[in-house]
Amino acid sequence: MKVQHYTDTPSAAVEEAPGVSVRWVISDKDGAPNFAMRVFDVAPGASTPYHQHPWEHEVFILQGQGVVKGEKQNRPFSEHFVVYIAPNEMHQFVNQGEGVLRFLCLIPHV
Amino acid sequence: MKVQHYTDTPSAAVEEAPGVSVRWVISDKDGAPNFAMRVFDVAPGASTPYHQHPWEHEVFILQGQGVVKGEKQNRPFSEHFVVYIAPNEMHQFVNQGEGVLRFLCLIPHV
């Protein structure tokens, strides 16, 4: 059992995304057998990369607002929205608020 | 891509746990291939069952406070705590606050 505040896990800059940082709060290092939980902070005006990959995202917005850019449309979100990105789907999280955008993003071990 | 507020998913009572309800906000019904995201509400004074099972829990506390009871100890938590429960580990989430305890709990498809 692991029980701790999410800020007890150190934050690391995301190299390919200026203004974005990540905490791997549950990972294979904890013995998690299937998937990992990360907490992302996106500074005002910043974005995650517009990209795709073979694994899914399961996302919960903790604070802030913005859009998820996809191939066909931009989908707005705000606090306590849920976002599911399917495998191989193009996506980008854009902070359009005045404060930090913070969200959980879970992925399978790859 | 699915983008919606978590309350857009209907809430269901958890039969074996009075005062506990759940929303399956991302599941295999959305095409998620590996794991599911649920949002639990636990009323003041209520608890999830004290039990174990072969799958893990990856939990994020959205609001409220309480303890996770295990075989060896009770671990306190409050808002924005992360909880990892390993496969086959005994556990129970107990709401010890005055308001609703709300947390995300992700599990692999079983």
Image: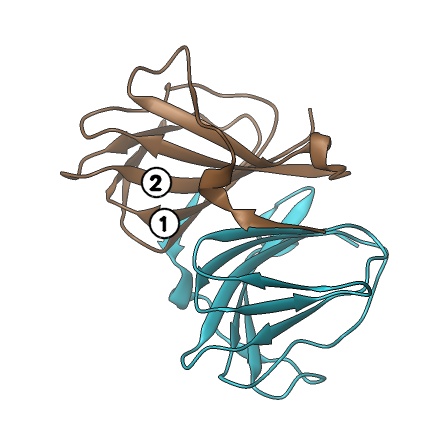
Chain colours: A brown, B cyan
Whether residue A80 is visible to the viewer of this picture, yes or no, is yes
Circles 2 and 1, Cβ within 8 Å, touching? The answer is yes
Q: Quadrant of the C terminus of chain A?
A: top right
Q: Secondary structure at mark 2?
A: strand
Q: Earlier in the sequence, mark 2 or mark 1?
A: 1
Disc 1: host chain: A
In this rendering, the answer to whether A78 lies above or below B74 is above
Q: Residue at x 61, y 75 (%)?
A: B94
Residue type, numbered disc 1 = Leu
Query: In the picture provided, is B59 more to the left or to the right than A52?
Result: right
Disc 2: host chain: A
Q: Which residue is mark 1?
A: A62
The location of residue B23, given as percent across then percent down, is 53, 68
Q: Residue at x 13, y 38 (%)?
A: A98
Q: Which residue is mark 2?
A: A102
For residue A26, the mark is none
The location of residue A87, given as percent across then percent down, is 58, 31
The location of residue B14, given as percent across then percent down, is 64, 80
